[in-house]
């Protein structure tokens, strides 16, 4: 176990491309840190710099109190788990797990004992004499983890280790990896493009875009209080709905409202006053965000205030059993979140696509125009130009 500090780490390639810029992170001893971002954002480059597989152009990397910029990968006391398992097909599971110990010339009795311990932790005891080709994808990934665990390193590095597994296995392995990491207490740096993995596994989650750190926080805080439009849209599935809107205050009543295209939604006074900086944005265009779970079918909630509703025509309905996702359009200008992996057709200059996470009791069907409740106290507001959150 060891704390890790990335102090303004930068990577510039010989052709001038800057993959990572001033990345600063502190991993506490035993922490599970997840670095998440879209394709090509620099997350794997950051991991490879920690591993020593990429040179650090600028900044310093400290592991367990020692600056390791110039230390060879083999001398950094780290273990990596890759997405392609990197197992030796001709070796048994036992031999694959034991391989790092053999390289260290560990005494035979100790080697056998450590392999058995790793196999028990990973529930691989009955597979020890099989070859990798006889195992499922999930079992092969466990073997790869066993080879990392058996070394008892100071730091685990995991580079999208679940990306080659099917959806059901990924769910199981997410829980398994998080549980094993907690049991071992080894500091872990985990890279993924899957924000669901990030949110369910990490003690803290760091979001990166175009080589720049956007925000780092506990998963719950990241979701509830995104620092900018990109984080707001990237974290959460389905993504946060984003529109251009205007916040206004009635001069006679003092009541606040948000104008989204042709529709006006009343907003509780306390929701506005909780963001003092919003006062300077009144009657000006801002980015307004609302999460899908804060929208629902008004037919199921007849007591919801009438001035906190919108009407829309259902375009797509996805019944998922525990919930129903409903897609519809709103005539408010679309906001580009900056996610290169997001679909381009989600909106245009005059309209935005929107998703609601409705109760499974909804009877709303495609083609119907319905009223939709809006939990207006849950609105998020961002500066239209900088895309930064409007708060204090």
Image (spheres, helix red, strand yellow):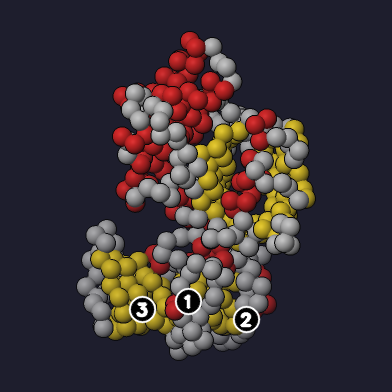
Q: Nearer the viewer, mark 1 or mark 2?
A: 1
Q: CA distance from mark 2 to mark 3?
A: 27 Å
Q: Nearer the viewer, mark 2 or mark 3?
A: 3
User: Residue drawn at (28%, 72%), measured in percent from left and top?
Assistant: 317
Q: Position of residue 390 (x, y in %)?
A: 63, 69
Residue 28 is left or right of residue 147, and the answer is right
Image quarter hosting the N terminus: top right
Image quarter hosting the C terminus: bottom right
Q: CA distance from mark 3 to mark 1?
A: 16 Å
User: Which secondary structure lies at badge 3?
Assistant: strand
User: Residue drawn at (59%, 53%), measured in percent from left and top?
Assistant: 43
Q: Which residue is mark 1?
A: 344
Tell me where residue 315 sits by quadrant: bottom left
Q: Which residue is mark 2?
A: 282
Q: Nearer the viewer, mark 3 or mark 1?
A: 1
Tell me where residue 250 sits by quadrant: bottom right
* 1 or 2: tag closer to the N-terminus: 2
Residue 106 is left or right of residue 55, and the answer is left
Residue 55 is left or right of residue 265, and the answer is right
Q: Which residue is mark 3?
A: 328
The residue positioned farthest toward the front in the image shown: 90
Q: CA distance from mark 1 to mark 2?
A: 30 Å
Q: Position of residue 282 (x, y in %)?
A: 62, 81
User: Which secondary structure lies at badge 2?
Assistant: loop
**Of the pair 333 and 263, the residue shown nearer to us:** 333
**Of the pair 26 and 373, the residue shown nearer to us:** 26
* 2 or 3: tag closer to the N-terminus: 2
User: Which secondary structure lies at badge 1?
Assistant: helix
Residue 364, which numbered label? none
């Amino acid at each position: 176990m060891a704390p890790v500090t990335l102090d303004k780490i930068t990577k510039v390639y010989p052709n001038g491309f800057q993959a990572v810029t001033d990345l600063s992170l502190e991993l506490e001893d035993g922490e599970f840190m997840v670095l998440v971002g879209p394709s090509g954002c620099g997350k794997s480059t950051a991991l490879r710099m920690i591993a020593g597989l990429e040179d650090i152009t600028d900044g310093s990397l400290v592991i367990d109190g020692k600056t390791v910029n110039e230390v060879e990968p083999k001398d950094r006391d780290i273990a990596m788990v890759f997405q392609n398992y990197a197992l030796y097909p001709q070796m048994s599971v036992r031999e694959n797990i034991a391989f790092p110990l053999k390289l260290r010339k560990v005494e035979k009795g100790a080697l056998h004992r450590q392999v058995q311990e790793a196999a028990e932790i990973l529930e691989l005891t009955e597979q020890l004499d099989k070859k990798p080709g006889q195992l499922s994808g999930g079992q092969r990934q466990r073997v790869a983890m066993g080879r990392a665990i058996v070394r008892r390193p100071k730091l685990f590095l995991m580079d999208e280790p679940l990306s080659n597994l099917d959806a059901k296995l990924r769910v199981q392995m997410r829980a398994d990896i998080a549980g094993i990491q907690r049991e071992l207490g080894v500091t872990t740096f985990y890279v993924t493009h899957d924000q669901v993995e990030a949110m369910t596994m990490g003690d803290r989650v760091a979001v990166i875009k175009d080589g720049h750190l956007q925000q780092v926080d506990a998963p719950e805080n990241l979701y509830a209080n995104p620092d900018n439009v990109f984080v707001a849209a990237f974290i959460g599935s389905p993504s946060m709905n984003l529109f251009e809107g205007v916040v206004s205050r009635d001069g006679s009543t003092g009541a606040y409202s948000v104008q989204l295209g042709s529709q006006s939604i009343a907003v509780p006074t306390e929701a506005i006053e909780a963001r003092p900086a919003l006062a300077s944005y009144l009657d000006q265009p801002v980015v307004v965000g609302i999460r899908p779970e804060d929208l629902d079918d008004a037919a199921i909630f007849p007591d919801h205030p009438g001035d906190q509703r919108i009407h829309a025509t259902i375009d797509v309905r996805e019944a998922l059993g525990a919930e129903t996702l409903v897609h519809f359009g709103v005539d408010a200008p679309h906001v580009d979140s900056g996610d290169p992996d997001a679909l381009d057709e989600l909106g245009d200059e005059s309209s935005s696509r929107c998703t609601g996470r409705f109760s499974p009791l909804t009877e709303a069907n495609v083609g119907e125009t319905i009223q939709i409740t809006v939990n207006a106290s849950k609105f998020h507001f961002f500066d239209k130009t900088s895309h930064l959150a409007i708060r204090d």
